[in-house]
Image (spheres, grey):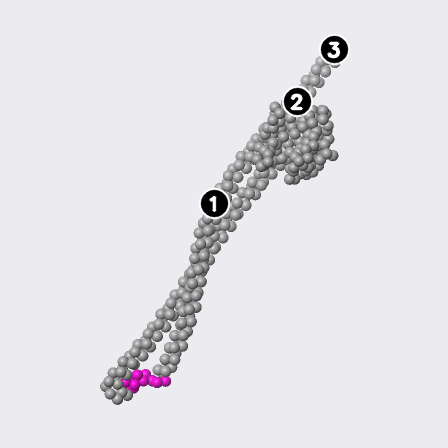
Amino acid sequence: MRRLLPISLMILALLVSSWGVHRNEAVAATSQTKQKLDEVKNEKKQTKEDLKAVEAKLEQHKKDLAQVDEKLSAYIQEVNRLNNELAANEKELKAVEQKLKKKLQRLYLQGENEYLAQILAADTFSDFLNRFQLIRIIVKQDVNDFKRYDEIKQKFEDDKAKIIKAKEEQEKLLKESKQRVDAMNKEMAKYKEELKQLEKEEEKLMGQFGFAGGGVLGYPSTPGKTYWNYGQNRGSHIHAGVDIPRPIGTPIYASEDGVVKSVRYDAGGYAWYIIVRHDNGLETLYAHMYSYQVKVSTGQRVSRGQVIGAVGNAGRSSGPHLHYEVHKNGQPVNPKPYIS
């Protein structure tokens, strides 16, 4: 009997030592997970700030684009005006061309001495002066017609050049604007994708950390996304807990050892919900279950990690999820510090 006693003590010491090693390993793993989670959160915060800066630039660029649109509108109006003016000038140019053609044909048929013959055919000096004055007026009109033709033709060519230039400026502005918008959208998409990946990593770590025992309470469901929306103003009420979106039927676990304080039904709100009073003085609430999903009854003793229900979508719920609350001294408190 005396020999067995030292052996028993040795076995007990080995068990205690082994438990201590495993416990230290678990604590170390929890510490590493928490450190990684903090790093991801910081990176996520920085990415959000970067994304916000890009969105601010894009917003400013939208204002710049409004000014570009005004310039484009002015160019379009100018092009339309020049096109109308060009059409009018082209019409007048054709009319003058026809008139000049007839005059040139007449001069060709009559010969270049026609005007001199008309003057010399005068019977009297007075008639000579009258004929001379009339021919001078005709010649002057002919010269004016040729001059007007040149002016209209030059104006026509100038307007065409202005239209080409205006269209080139318009296309340049459109190209620059498109390039800037494409670049900003590409940069924004990059940050959004990065943020999406960080959120996935955060969800994964949150689930691991919840089960690693780093907080006072264990995570109440399977690892994954958590909406930390405690205190959110819902209009009709202030949100007293957090939401954990999961498919219907996903297990709900007791966060810590304790006794089921109550299992109740609230038709217009939580539907079927469970309240557990824990040995550490805290209470936890699990809501939006269907009646068949409740696995415990009032007064029942439960242990940390025990399945007490399943995720539902009953009561005032916009989608399948677990509504989870932590109560301290009878009042709801933010669950995040207790489970993460």
Q: Nearer the viewer, residue 334 or 169?
A: 334
Amino acid type at image mark 1 = Lys
Instruction: Give the foreground label among 2 and 3.
Output: 2
Q: Specify which label sits upstream in the sequence, 2 or 3.
A: 3
The Cα–Cα distance between marks 3 and 1, rounded to whole angstroms, is: 83 Å
Q: Residue at x 63, y 22 (%)?
A: 281
- Can residue 3 be seen by looking at this rendering? yes
Q: Which SS class for mark 3?
A: loop
- Residue type for callout 2: Asp
Cα distance in 3D space between marks 2 and 3? 40 Å
In the drawing, does residue 266 fall left or right of residue 161?
right
Res. 57 mark: 1
Measured from the top left, where is residue 22 in percent x and y?
A: 65, 25
Percent x, y of residue 294: 72, 32
| Residue segment shown in magenta | 109-119
Front residue of 327/212: it is 327
Q: Residue at 62%, 36% (x, y): give it.
A: 225
Crowding near pointer 2: few (<14 within 10 Å), some, many (20+)? Answer: few
When the figure is inspected, residue 23 is found, relative to residue 313, above or below; the finding is above
Residue type at mark 3: give it.
Arg
> Depth check: 176 or 110 in front?
110
Label 3: how many residues lie within 10 Å, few (<14), some (14-19) or many (20+)?
few
Whether tag 2 and tag 3 are in contact, CB under 8 A, the answer is no
Spatial CA span between label 1 and label 2? 53 Å
Residue at 59%, 36% in the rendered image: 236
Where is mark 3, residue-wise? 2
Residue 74 on image: x %, y %: 43, 57
- Tell me the SS state at disc 2: loop
